[in-house]
Amino acid sequence: MPVSMAATDDRELEELRRKKMQEYLNMLSRGNTMPKEEEPLIKHISDKELQAAMEAGENFLLDLWAEWCGPCKMLEPIFKELSEEYKGKVKFYKLNVDEYPQVSMRFGVMGIPTVLFFRGGKAIDRIVGLMPKSTFLGKIHQHYL
């Protein structure tokens, strides 16, 4: 890169940094703080986090999945849509059965994907295999709404 282009790029980068710093300082002077990151709509959890959610009596759907599972990957967009539609009404968790096989044993899961429905921290229903979104909607309405 010619010297003149490098100098121009450096000036542009410095100007961008200066503008961003000024925006940040203006925001702080108005009493604002840095924007908080929103919690993801679907949270990947561990066995310990699952136990904590159950003990807290949460209402949630738990997608038991594995990286190698084709139907599990096909369920992802459905689960994402549901988590957006029911944000604030029910939580959506995912747990990798290869990382936490004891969870599969605990709930008698024989195939994946399996979505467990929890109300008040207790498993109350399940859907095994890839099903259409309407199947999940029916269960959500039955158990949570």
Image: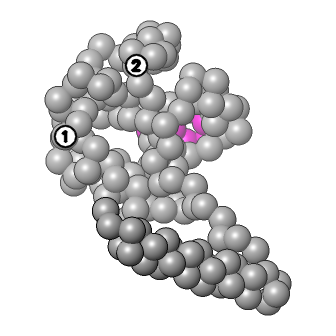
Type of amino acid under label 1 = Met
Residue at mark 1 = 74
Above/below status of 72 relative to 138: above
Question: As rendered, which of 36 and 108 lies closer to the eye?
Answer: 36
Q: Which residues are magenta?
A: 117-122
- Residue drawn where x is 25% and y is 33% of the image: 72
Question: As rendered, which of 90 and 77 lies closer to the eye?
Answer: 77
Above/below status of 29 relative to 1: below
| Element class at badge 1 | helix
Residue 50 at what x, y percent from top left? 58, 30
Of the numbered discs in the image, which one, if any, rests on residue 97? 2
The N terminus sits in image quarter:
bottom left
Disc 2 versus disc 1: distance between alpha carbons?
17 Å
Residue 35 at what x, y percent from top left? 65, 70
Above/below status of 81 relative to 100: below
From the image, give the main secondary structure of the stretch colored magenta: strand
- Residue drawn where x is 56% and y is 75% of the image: 14
Type of amino acid under label 2 = Val
Residue 13 at what x, y percent from top left? 50, 73
Residue 48 horizontal side relative to residue 80, left or right: right
Above/below status of 104 relative to 115: above
Q: Is residue 68 magenta?
A: no
